[in-house]
Structure formats: C-alpha cells, structure tokens
Amino acid sequence: MLVGAGNTRRGLACTALLAGVLTGCAEASDEAPRASATTADAAGGSGKVAKSGGTIGRSGSACELPVTFDIAADWKAEAIDAETTGDGSDLAEELADALLHQGPVTGTCEVDAKPAGHIGFLRVWTGKPGKDDARTVLKAFVAAEDNTSKPKYTTFKSGGLDGVEVEYLFTSKLLDETKKERALAVTTASGPVVLHLGGLDSEEYEDMLPAFELAKQTLRTA
C-alpha cells in the first residue's frame, strides 16, 4: 500500500486481506442473521451512532494512540505491532510492509467487527509530526490505495479537533467488485491520525457506519 509500491505489493496485500475475509465468512454462521447495530440519533440528525462498548487510545487501553475514541459494543480492538509482524521471511516482510503502510501513515490499531456480527474493520493509522494538514494527509492515504474513485470530502469538528472525512469507492481487481469505504483524518501534536472503515461489501459498510460515527463524534486528543 505504499505510494508507488506497485501492483505486486497491492496484490500481496489483497491476497492476505481476502484470506482474512474468507476466514470471517467461514466463522459467520448461515443460520444467524446479521447483527444490526444498536443506534441512537446522531448529533444534528445526520446519521446513526452505535452504542459504545468502551474507549480506546488512553494509556493502558487495548491501543495507545494520540487520540481517544469510543468503539461500538462487542467490537474488539487490538494493537498492531509492526516489529513482530511476519515470520522473518522476505515474502512475509514484504507482505507486512504492504499491509502496515499506506501513504504517510502506518497501521497502529485494528478494531474487529466480527464479534458484533459484521465482516469488517475500523483501522487506525498514525504518522510522524509534520506540516501537512488533515486534508493533505487524507488525500495521500486515499491515493495510496489503488483503484479508488469518486471521493467526497467534508470537514467536521469533534472534541476540539478539526478533521476531514472522505467517502469513496474501491474496486477490487481480485474480487472483481466495487464497494464503499470511508476514512477521516485529524492532526495532533504527536502526528496525523487516520481512521478507516472497510468491510466485505457495501452492505456491510452501511451496517457498520454507526460504529464509524461513534468514533468520529467521540474523537478527542489523548
């Protein structure tokens, strides 16, 4: 996913992500209906917000970050340790590098929706302090994800932070389908932070949007 890394790394990343998606599909019982998020009206009436399952980002939480935010009930957060990813082989290192880096940011935390009945993740990416504003960071993040189109950028404020949000389409050549994705970016004294929501398909994306809205509305500097 590095900018200019080429289709080889993107293909490796897609293969790994597909494996994870297929594992999730296998674990989801056909007999159980998709779980719907517990929701309440969002501030301003602009959408739905999931019921909180706790806050991450603080020292001692599952993921220590430059920001804090609430995750949806039953979603499970886990820190990503770049130092221990892979098995030491060249292929594993290349694959880990492709998965962990996207544009100016690096994967730091993964919040899994599977325990709540969805196939998808809310991932947190962080970067080093610099002069780029949130929009610049977010545009570079989207540009580094090949095969994207129709980005729609908007601004928002949350907890004293000025952020930029984008909804766009991603077309997977591996799966031969197009789906919706969403991300937001803010900048802090510790560097930029990107939250990205991705799911198996656009239907899962829509079902998981309340969790993204919860994160956005509770976003604060740690």
Image: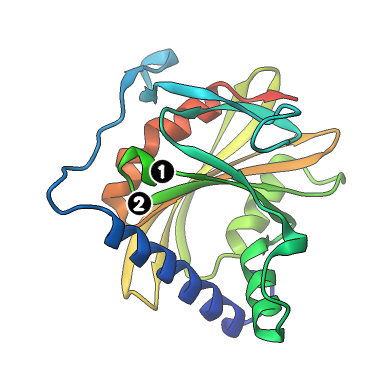
Which kind of residue does numbered mark 2 sit on?
A: Ile
In the rendered image, which quarter contains the C terminus?
top right
Q: Which quarter of the picture shows residue 143?
A: bottom right
Mark positioned earlier in the residue sequence (2 or 1): 1
Q: In this view, does 173 lie above or below 208?
A: below
Residue marked by disc 2 = 119
Determine the residue positioned at 75% across, 42% down: 192
Q: Which colour scheme is used?
A: rainbow
Task: Count the marks.
Answer: 2
Which kind of residue does numbered mark 1 sit on?
A: Ala
Residue 2 visible in the shown view: no
In this rendered view, identify the residue nearer to me: 181 or 29: 29
Q: Is disc 2 placed on a helix, strand or loop?
A: loop
Q: In this view, does 179 lie above or below 47?
A: below
User: How dense is the environment of label 1, judged by Cα within 10 Å: few (below 14), some, or many (20 and up)?
Assistant: many
- Marks 2/1: CA–CA distance: 6 Å
Residue marked by disc 1 = 113
Determine the residue positioned at 73% across, 29% down: 60
In this rendered view, identify the residue nearer to me: 126 or 177: 126
Return the x and y of residue 57 as percentages of the image width and height.
68, 31
Q: Is disc 1 placed on a helix, strand or loop?
A: loop
In the rendered image, which quarter contains the N terminus?
bottom right
Q: Image check: 197 left or right of 171?
A: right
Residues under numbered marks 2 and 1 in contact, where contact means CB atoms less than 8 Å apart: yes
Residue 168 visible in the shown view: yes
Return the x and y of residue 6 as percentages of the image width and height.
63, 82
Q: Image check: 17 left or right of 116?
A: right
